[in-house]
Amino acid sequence: MEKEKLERISELTRISRVRELTDEEKIEREALRNEYRAAMRASLEGTLKNTYIQYPDGTKKKVEKKG
């Protein structure tokens, strides 16, 4: 996610502490938050695709997605 979008999320949060956000700002904040969550989820899934558990006997098992 771009730095500008992260800064905008922070800016909207600061504004919300001072005054009520407009409907447009609320929609924008929610869309940015959803985009941030999706990016974090994709990053975590990418990391887990390359993660293995090594057991004391030396065997390795790839971490798999459940569900």
Image: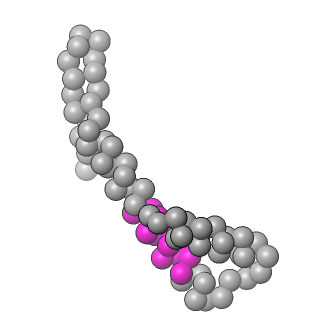
Q: Position of residue 57 (x, y in %)?
A: 23, 10
Residue found at x 39% / y 63%: 38
Up/down of 58 relative to 23, above or below: above
Q: Quadrant of the N terminus?
A: bottom left
Which region of the structure is painted magenta? Answer: 28-38
Image coordinates for residue 49, horizontal then vertical, percent = 25, 43
Quadrant in the rendering for residue 19: bottom right
Q: Residue at x 59, y 81 (%)?
A: 26
Residue 23 covered by magenta stretch? no
Q: How many marks?
A: 0
Image location (x, y in percent) of residue 9 = 59, 70
Magenta segment includes 33: yes
Q: Is residue 10 left or right of residue 34?
A: right
Q: Is residue 45 left or right of residue 7?
A: left
Majority SS type along the magenta span: helix
Determine whether 52 is above or below 50 in the image: above
Image position of 19 with respect to 11: above or below: below
Query: On the picture, is 59 further left or further right than 37?
Result: left
Give the residue furthest to the right.
Answer: 18
| Residue placed furthest toward the top | 57
Q: Residue at x 76, y 72 (%)?
A: 17
Taking the view exactly as shown, the residue that stands out farthest to the bottom is 23
Observer-nearest residue: 64 or 42?
42
- 27 w.r.t. 11: above or below: below
- Residue 53 location, quadrant: top left
The picture places residue 50, in percent across and down from the top left corner, at 26, 38
Q: How is the image coloured?
A: one colour
What's the residue at 21%, 23% (across, down)?
60
